């Protein structure tokens, strides 16, 4: 029941990507993510994900703990063409997700390979 509730809230927060936003190239994606912490906007607040320049990532989230049973997860990220891809070890059942990322001012707008979309921002 809790999982369905969290999923319904997440689905309600989906924001369509703006057509006027600039789609990031592979070089832009590398500069945007490598060595940075990116905060994903969620119904529960910001989810900060730290991306190392070596292709690993880590995040901690109480909401994901409720959903998956794990407060912290690690994974890997890579760039494939002009898409940003990531795979968590535990969260999302370890399935790789790839995203098209657009920049609209200081906001990042992402659309995943399964059609979900949302916003994020670089926090450092």
Image (tube, grey):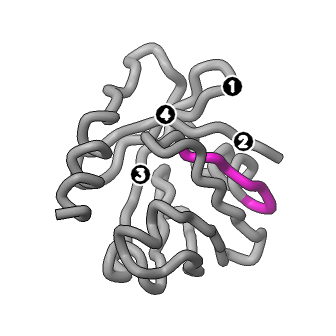
Q: Secondary structure at mark 3?
A: strand
Per the picture, the main secondary structure of the magenta-coloured stretch is strand
Residue 89: which disc? none
Mark 2 and mark 1 in contact? Answer it, CB < 8 Å.
yes
Closer to the chain start, of discs 2 and 1, is: 1
Vertical relation: 34 (above or below) 69: above
Closer to the chain start, of discs 3 and 1, is: 3
Say which quarter of the image contains residue 46: top right
Q: Kindly report the distance in space between the C-alpha atoms of the residues bearing marks 4 and 1.
A: 10 Å
Q: Picture coordinates of residue 114 (x, y %)?
A: 23, 53
In the image, the segment drawn in magenta is 34-40
Q: Which residue is mark 3?
A: 99
Q: Which residue is mark 1?
A: 106
Tell me, yes or no, whether the highlighted magenta stretch contains residue 41.
Answer: no
Q: Which residue is mark 4?
A: 109
Q: Which residue is mark 2?
A: 122
Query: Which is more toward the observer, 112 or 74?
Result: 74
């Amino acid at each position: 029941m809790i999982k369905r509730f969290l999923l319904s809230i997440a689905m309600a927060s989906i924001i369509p990507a703006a057509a006027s936003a600039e789609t990031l190239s592979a070089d832009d994606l590398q500069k945007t993510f490598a060595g940075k912490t990116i905060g994903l906007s969620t119904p529960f607040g910001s989810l900060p994900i730290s991306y190392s320049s070596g292709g690993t990532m880590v995040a901690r989230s109480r909401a994901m703990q409720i959903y998956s049973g794990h407060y912290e997860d690690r994974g890997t990220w890579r760039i494939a063409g002009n898409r940003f891809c990531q795979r968590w070890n535990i969260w999302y059942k370890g399935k790789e997700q790839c995203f098209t990322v657009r920049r609209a001012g200081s906001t990042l707008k992402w659309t995943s390979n399964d059609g979900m979309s949302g916003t994020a921002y670089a926090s450092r």
